[in-house]
Image: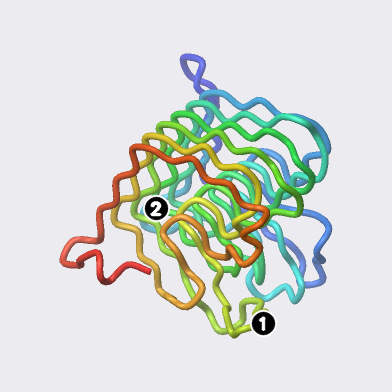
Amino acid sequence: SIVGGKATISGVMLTVPTSAGKVGGVGGLVGKAENSIYTYNLTVTGDTNTKVVFGRADAGSFKNVGGIVGNITNGNEFTFDTCEVSNINLKSREVSGGISGNISGSPVVTCNNVVVSGVTFGSSYAGGINGSIGGTPTFNITNIKIENNIFENPSNMWEGSNNQKSRSGGICGDGKGVFKISNVLFDSNDFQGKNGQGLVFGDTKTKIDLQVYAAGIDIKPIKGKTTSDLP
């Protein structure tokens, strides 16, 4: 629906067959993006009590699910301005992101005035903004709230070397590229598998490909927890 210039996608369940593979994607707006996208004033939401499901947990090798875009395979610029993703259960064995699942190549990705809230991430390489990265993109991330989300650690997720199953982060599951981050709030997020999880990134093993410029980051644990309980 569109009301007052604001577009809302609500209560839509997006599932895939058990034979779904690795090359496609599932997203609230676009499954597989092969060109640049500009998204403004968009809300993708489910119900607070019964979250809608994007993807499928028992689909074998299925990967790439995102709140707005599942799999970005081409394009130079992706902008998400004044967007919200809330109350969705992102399900796959590998790769899920609050805004985008996977990004290939080296585009410029801008996220401004974005809220990701009440989302359950059920895969490895999961991130509040993006899941996995196949190139070295540049992220401009400003005025963001990542709040009340659950980063699960299920037994059926993809597991790589070093027994790091989750590789989940508040911003990105995969730490590659250039990240310019300012005015970000991490509030009451539940990280259920500290091995391979991080407040900002899940996996930064290729540090040579990672540059981070950050200012104005606020971290609030779940009520009754302390910072020592965080990954």
| Secondary structure category for the residue under label 1 | helix
- Closer to us: 148 or 125: 125
Give the quadrant of residue 225.
Answer: bottom left
Q: Residue at x 34, y 43 (%)?
A: 217
- Closer to us: 49 or 61: 61
Decide: few, some or many residues near mark 2? Use Cα within 10 Å; few <14, some 14-19, many ≥20. Answer: many
**In the figure, is residue 226 to the left or right of 114?**
left
The image shows residue 40 at horizontal and vertical percentages of 56, 23
Give the quadrant of residue 96.
Answer: bottom right
The image shows residue 22 at horizontal and vertical percentages of 80, 64
The image shows residue 146 at horizontal and vertical percentages of 40, 47
Q: Residue at x 40, y 57 (%)?
A: 149
Q: Nearer the viewer, mark 1 or mark 2?
A: 1
Q: What number is the disc on residue 118?
A: 2
Look at label 1 and name its amino acid.
Ser
Look at label 2 and name its amino acid.
Gly
Decide: few, some or many residues near mark 1? Use Cα within 10 Å; few <14, some 14-19, many ≥20. Answer: few
**Up-down: is 191 above or below 109?**
below
**In the figure, is residue 143 to the left or right of 130?**
left
Q: Closer to the N terminus: mark 1 or mark 2? A: 2
**In the figure, is residue 115 to the left or right of 188?**
right
- Closer to us: 219 or 156: 219
Residue 12 visible, this angle? no
Report the residue marked by disc 1. Answer: 161
Q: Residue at x 50, y 32 (%)?
A: 83
| Secondary structure category for the residue under label 2 | loop
Q: Which quarter shows the N terminus?
A: top right
Find the residue positioned furthest to the left. 224
Q: Residue at x 52, y 40 (%)?
A: 44
Residue 139 visible, this angle? yes
Q: CA distance from mark 1 to mark 2?
A: 30 Å
The image shows residue 62 at horizontal and vertical percentages of 74, 67
